Amino acid sequence: MGRGMKSSAKNIQMTSFEDLFQSSGNSGSGGEKVQEIALTDLFPFRDHPFKVLDDEAMADMVESVKTYGILVPGIARPGTGGGYELVSGHRRKRAAELAGLETMPVIVREMGDDEAVLMMVDSNLQRENILPSEKAWAYRMKLEALKHQGVKDTSRQLGEKYSIDALSENSNDSARNIHRFIRLTELVPSMLQMVDDKKLPFNPAVELSYLTKEEQVNLSEKMAGLSHVPSLEQAKRLRKFSQEGKLGEDVIEAILTEERKAPPQVTLKGERLRQYFSEEYTQKQIEDVIISLLETWKKEHA
């Protein structure tokens, strides 16, 4: 962090919350009061899909909190069993804990389940370096919230289409990719972890999400034993056998252990080429002529 940024952050910390929220004294933009709430009274959002990791980024946040405190209040709603359910601010709370603080500034807001889900997801999807599993579950939770609020008197499929289209309006992902991310939530945990760890590519993972849970477990065990991850083409065939009810352990092993066809390679010896090309031809010129002749042959035999 540059000297200017540190100075600016220090100035912000010296500014009271009353000055930061001038519209209503010590309040948020909607007139809601900023409260210092004990960390022990703040509980994570139910089924919160975003991981709070004690990684390097968290270490940087802890140092910032130690120096300047929590500059931006979290947002919470009253909990059903007492305390408060965090909607936004899970990483800030963890940083405050590691920094040795006992409280953090929070805006308490009354909101329903769907409204809380939408705010929780939107406040986190803007972050960089989101794991595939985080994005998958976040999109699924937001989809369900939009469907609850959404188009009435339509079929489930049509309502879901409208909701996914609405999801894509405020996202960098297309409606098709959002649907594919949501498919990842159908993976068993071990398989989804492989996607997060970049051991299983996204596209094959989407295909494998259509396998039954039992088939996925069997596949995970075979993948670990054989140290082999299916290609996209293999994943599509695994899905096809699953849909036909024929994906037993023997079929899984046969597909995973099959030899991949290597691309054809043809080597032409120089003395043979010289029967057709004089010494004035360079290697590139020879290759260009051969490719041109092959293109003509391809058109004639298409």
Image: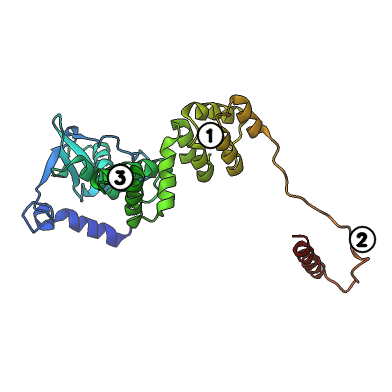
Label 2 is placed on what type of residue? Arg
Measured as percent of width and height from the top left, residue 206 is found at 49, 42
Give the left or right position of residue 91, taking residue 84 as reference: right
197 or 262, which is in the foreground? 262
Q: Which of 282 and 268 is in front in this view?
A: 268
Residue positioned most to the bottom: 280
Question: Disc 1 designates what residue?
Answer: 243
Residue 250, position in %: x, y?
Answer: 63, 25
Q: Mark 2 points at which residue?
A: 272
- Mark 3 lies on a secondary structure that is helix
Q: Which residue occupies the extreme left position in the image?
A: 25
3D distance between C-alphas at marks 3 and 2: 66 Å
Looking at the image, which residue is at 50% across and 40% down?
205
Mark seen at residue 46: none
Q: In which quarter of the image is residue 285?
A: bottom right
- Residue 142's disc is 3
In percent of width and height, residue 174 lies at 41, 55
Residue at 16% x, 40% y is 77
In the visual, does 272 lie left or right of 264?
A: right
Give x and y (percent) for residue 140: 35, 42
What residue is shown at x 78% (from left), y 60% (from top)?
A: 301
